[in-house]
Image (cartoon, rainbow, N blue to C red):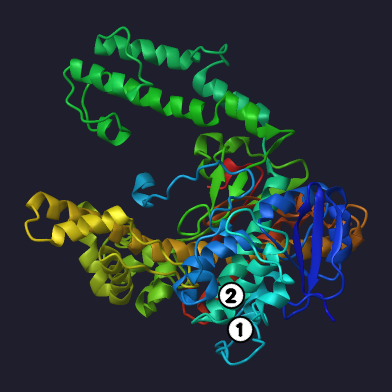
Amino acid sequence: MTTAYIVVSEAGPGRVLLEPLDPDGAPVGSAAELPRTALAAAVAERERARPRWVWNDTQRWYPALLAENVRIDRCIDLRLCHTILRASTLTANSALATAPPNAWDTLRPAGAPAATPKPVEPSLFDDLAEIDRPVEPVDPRSTRHKSPSEGAEKAIIDGSTGDERATGDERATGGERATGGEREVGDERREFALQRDAIATASDPSRIALLVAAESVGALAAAELRHAGLPWSAERHDALLTRVLGPRPREGERPAELERLLQRIRNLLGDPTVNPDSPVELLKALRRAGITVDSTREWELKNLKHPAIEPLLDYKKRSRLLTANGWNWLDTWVVDGRFHANYLPGGVVTGRWAAEGGGALQLPKQVRGAVVADEGRMLVVADAAQLEPRILAALAGDRAMAAAGRGRDLYDGIVASGAVDTRAHAKVGMLGAMYGGTAGESGRMLPRLARAFPAAVAYVEAAARTGETGGVVSTRLGRTSPRPSDEWRDLHDLAASDGATDALRTRARTEARSWGRFTRNFVVQGTAAEWALCWIGSIRRRLHALAAADAAANPRTAPDAAAADDPTTAADTLTTGPHLSFFLHDEVMVHTPAHLADAVAHELREAAAEAGRLIFGDAPVEFPVTVAIVDSYDKAK
């Protein structure tokens, strides 16, 4: 019997259990218990058969394998998939979704802080395998369900989805059951069986199967990104810090340029002790100087006329660089010429990635000149053009909006349609539609866009209305938004009761509109995150194939030609061949041998088109990417 899956679990201190399962999820052959130190060799040997590795958390297992030069193609990340399946409306009636809370609901990724911050409403205004035919429905009476998205996931990782229904918990767990607290040996198998059942019995199995497959592939890519690292020149970084801040100061002292600006600010405000690093102190000093201001936010300070404002804004800009990416950051996060970011797939409620510690998703333009390709290599940087508006056009089936972006910049196409007069107005209006901007220019442009693209605007308006009433919305593939808190619901109940004050009703309406803005954006941003996952999965597969072909064609200059087929050396291609080195929502960077740069650029474009087909089939929406081949990141834009 073929081994389709291998479940990896703890078997006691320093011990690991490998349990092979057949395509139906039933045990096949003998389980192997081995020391944790022998895991990499065991995985390398079994990886030749290309099973899907099933484990509780990719971050707990895969980095150690990569450290031993063992790369795997496929996995099922039970932690990430559990979160999706537990909340999705597509699987709401499954045994997994209706079960009482258990340890899987609180399992954190390896290395994550003990308390995960509560997701907040996202706001863009803060920073102003191919499906050729419809998938067939699954017959719920069947005891073994064929994967409805087999062709779709094949395009991502060249394998089946593994979402066939298990034949029973007793087969999947060997009779062992998990407790509500500490998980027992065998719990991974039970959770796997529940997840397979949830997918197979979902109201739309093909969509949710693709989502959990893409999420798991993303987890592999995140670990590989951290393993390979982003090429970083500490010398260049130190030089730019010195240029902006002055020479590196002694511990506890301000850099010379900040000290110079501080003295100027104090003189202009007539306050010899004010500390611009303290918002409270600064606000008091500004008011004492006769400056009427409600906060020290940059956008508010820019509107003030006072001699101290210019140096104060300059100070805040340089201080941000010191705090976020100064010398301490450089000492902490750049090791041997690489920035090893800790990506957290699914770290944001919409499915976007987050990053822990080093701020991988917040690299400011000031430090991008320190991202430098190694000698003989180049950086291929690809950026999806107007991704979220294009996602909205596809979600809504708005053919007019799809046509506006065909073969050109979408915002330019909106201007050409006659909806608005400038590209800037097209952009701010579309962002207002997706993020709930009803004031200023965005509010003024929205009626024009609604007339030109009624389906797109109606789609996000409907999502907003659902959120305002406390309902949930879902992305294209089935990730579902959280419900408002109990406090939110209590507020609305009180506001609807007899005797409610006008202030209470006003507050309830404000809270409702705020949650409506969240759900309005959730459907677009969440689906864009799904597109990005499919893009990454396709890129990952394509780069590995490209590295293997190059190794075979150039055995003297490339990694060993057998590397692509030998998992014990395949991970070498993550650093010697073309490999992903950076990811930021809708942008990727590949660090590649220079002679492969053009081929990599081609694959990045093809992968983007493939991601669009995976999620939206033959919808007439293009997902173009702009690609730059450069030797340092600051030259990409």
At label 1, the amino acid type is: Pro
Whether label 1 touches label 2, CB < 8 Å: yes
Q: Is residue 77 above or below residue 591?
A: below
Which residue occupies the foreground of this view, 46 or 499?
Answer: 499
Circle 2: element type: helix
Circle 1: element type: loop
Residue reaching furthest to the right: 556
List x then y, in percent, for residue 158. 72, 73
Which residue occupies the foreground of this view, 44 or 228?
Answer: 44
Identified at 21% across, 67% down, the residue is 447
Residue 492 falls in which quadrant of the image? bottom left
List x then y, in percent, for residue 586. 52, 57
Identified at 69% across, 76% down, the residue is 170
Identified at 29% across, 9% down, the residue is 267
Q: Return the mark for residue 29.
A: none
Upstream in sequence: badge 1 or badge 2: 1
Q: Is residue 603 visible?
A: no
Which residue occupies the foreground of this view, 173 or 483?
Answer: 173
Q: Return the mark for residue 148.
A: 1
Q: Is residue 628 above or below residue 243?
A: below
Q: Mark 1 Cα within 10 Å, few/some/many (few <14, many 20+)?
A: many
Residue 414 falls in which quadrant of the image? bottom left
List x then y, in percent, for residue 309. 28, 23
Quarter holding the N terminus is bottom right
Q: Return the mark for residue 209.
A: 2
* Left or right of 175 in this view: 381: left
At label 2, the amino acid type is: Ala
